[in-house]
Image: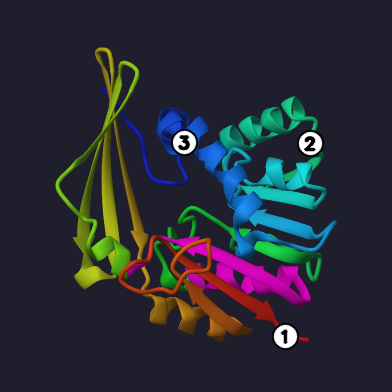
Amino acid sequence: MTRTGGFQDDDFWTEFHDFLFSEQRHAQTEELLDTSPLLTFPAGARVLDLCCGPGVFTVPLARRGHDVTGVDLSPAMLDRARKRAADADAQVTYVRADARVFEAPGAFDVVLNMFTSFGYFEDPADNARVLHRMYACLTPGGTLVLDVAGKELLARKVTPPKVVRRGEDLMVQTDTVLDEWARLRSDWVLVRGEQVTRATLVWFVYSAVELRRMVEEAGFSRVEIFGGFDGRPYDENAERLVLRAVRGA
């Protein structure tokens, strides 16, 4: 039996990669980029994917003609992203950096943060700092798109353990609400033959109101909240919490 740490532990991303970033997810991303009004950007836009993982968004965005930079802290994820870009003949710049300190003042027209990649720092001030870095990286008039599982959605989805099977591998995920809904803990168990790997992630969860306030405090304006990438309202039928905001002049 082995145990991995949290999101800053490279072993976690390696062990659970196939469950987190399946080929189905890559295919869904291609469809989103073809159909979503929230992910349609001007030709040749300079796009930063902060916490890019294995290049789920960076590679298809580059293939659509955008100037793409992917930033992640995980060497293992960046290695996968670089290989995926090479296999697709896509030109992407990848940088290993902590989202709290990455600096490229005014260098991007768009900043993306996708698949609930926000809220994982233990100190709430660090999560706010990430929003300030996103703001600083945008050119005036640039757009932020932030995608998370909103607290309202999680409240109706925190259920008994979730079981997922891929081939002979079995993954069990158990979620626990912490601190009166300030945070969520996910305990993961992966069974591969006789090997059992355990991991725990703890992150802050945000309602639409809370996330809007944080984004506005970071300096953004024209904040909009959507319930999915199709631009639907954030209501009882929402599938995601997708926030779009603008850096002012």
Numbered label attached to residue 60:
none
Q: Quadrant of the N terminus?
A: top left
- Label 2 and label 3: CA atoms lie apart by 23 Å
Q: Earlier in the sequence, mark 1 or mark 3?
A: 3
Name the amino acid, label 2.
Ala
Q: For the point 58% across and 71% down, which residue is it?
A: 131
In the picture of the structure, the residue carrying the numbered disc 1 is 248
- Magenta segment boundaries in residue numbering: 127-151
Instruction: Name the front one of labels 2 and 3.
Output: 2
Describe the element under mark 1 as helix, strand or loop: loop
Position of residue 9 in the picture relative to residue 221 (left or right): left
Q: Residue at x 49, y 76 (%)?
A: 225
Residue 163's spot in the image, x, y percent? 23, 35
Which residue is the extreme one toward the left?
160
Q: State the SS at label 3.
A: helix
Distance of label 1 from label 3 (alpha carbons): 36 Å
Question: Residue 242: x and y, percent?
Answer: 50, 66
At label 3, counting other C-alpha atoms closer than 10 Å, the crowd grade (few under 14, some 14-19, many 20 or more) is many
Q: CA distance from mark 1 to mark 2?
A: 31 Å
Label 2: which residue?
90
Identified by mark 3, the residue type is Trp
Asked if one can make out residue 72 in the rendered structure from this viewpoint, the answer is: yes
User: SS at mark 2?
Assistant: loop
